[in-house]
Amino acid sequence: MGNIWGYCRVSSRDQNEDRQLITMKEMNVPEKNVFVDRQSGKDFNRPQYKKLMRRIKAGDVLYIKSIDRLGRNYRDIQEQWKIITKDKCSDIVVVDMPLLDTRREKNLLGTFISDIVLALLSFVAENERINIRQRQAEGIAAAKAKGVRFGRPLKPLPDNFYDVYQCWKMKKITINQAASECGMPRSTFFSKAEKFGKATFPNLDKNPKKYTFQDC
């Protein structure tokens, strides 16, 4: 009898794979034979999956909880399924879909049914990936329309920026000295100063701290 393997995947490092690991334990997959990737399922360029593929061989059985944990790209799923079941002569068991158990019904009808179910679920997995991306894009667009800013938190201008800027504009100090006084690279100071000079800020001399690099 061959080895038993398990493959788990979550889309990012802050997601939890515990449910998949519990399933692997219930299927009696040895802990040392479980491979976990923490990245998108858009393709199969994943370190743990590649490592698993190097070790799996004829007569082995691979468990996955659901087809979308294997991947979310229709053609890639079909290709990997073929590699595992035909090229490597191993079996695959999709726990959440009993019809996708290549150990059963190895006759022509069983293979035909498995192929149909695999094609359908692979299509659903990819379609969901596309929908997720579309919802994300729509959500970002809606948030931006409401004034939500994305990216790193804004840094406030240094407390002395206004005074240093005035000294630099009056040629009392060089741009290198001005940048050093503000604790920023020369190019950054010049860029912020240039935008600062073109902008109109009411009561700036009374409250310069409230302005940020992005405002400039």
Image (cartoon, rainbow, N blue to C red):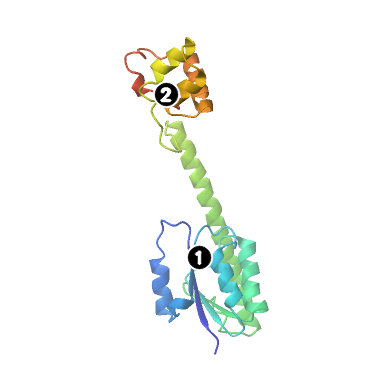
Q: CA distance from mark 2 to mark 1?
A: 53 Å
Q: Is residue 41 visible?
A: yes
Q: Amino acid at mark 1?
A: Arg
Extreme right residue here? Answer: 87
Q: Residues within 10 Å of mark 1 (few under 14, many from 20)?
A: some
Q: How many marks?
A: 2
Q: Nearer the viewer, mark 2 or mark 1?
A: 2
Residue 181 numbered mark, or none: 2
Q: Residues within 10 Å of mark 2 (few under 14, many from 20)?
A: some
Q: Are marks 2 and 1 in contact (CB under 8 Å)?
A: no
Q: Quick one: 31 or 28, which is closer to the camera?
A: 31
Could you tell me which secondary element the residue under label 2 belongs to?
A: helix
Extreme left residue here? Answer: 206
- List the residue tagged with mark 1: 69
Could you tell me which secondary element the residue under label 1 belongs to?
A: helix
Residue under the image location 63 percent in, 63 percent down: 76
Could you tell me which quadrant the N terminus lies in?
bottom right
Q: Quick one: 95 or 40, which is closer to the camera?
A: 40
Whole-percent x, y for residue 186 in the image: 52, 26
Q: Quick one: 160 or 59, which is closer to the camera?
A: 160
Whole-percent x, y for residue 45 in the image: 60, 61
Whole-percent x, y for residue 100 in the image: 54, 75
Q: Amino acid at mark 2?
A: Glu
Residue under the image location 63 percent in, 85 percent down: 107
Left or right of 23: which side holds 62? right
Task: Specify the quadrant of the image occupied by residue 126.
Answer: bottom right
Task: Specify the quadrant of the image occupied by residue 88.
Answer: bottom right
Task: Specify the quadrant of the image occupied by residue 115.
Answer: bottom right
Residue under the image location 49 percent in, 46 percent down: 135
Q: Is residue 62 above or below residue 122?
A: below
Left or right of 183: which side holds 56? right
Q: Is residue 200 visible?
A: no
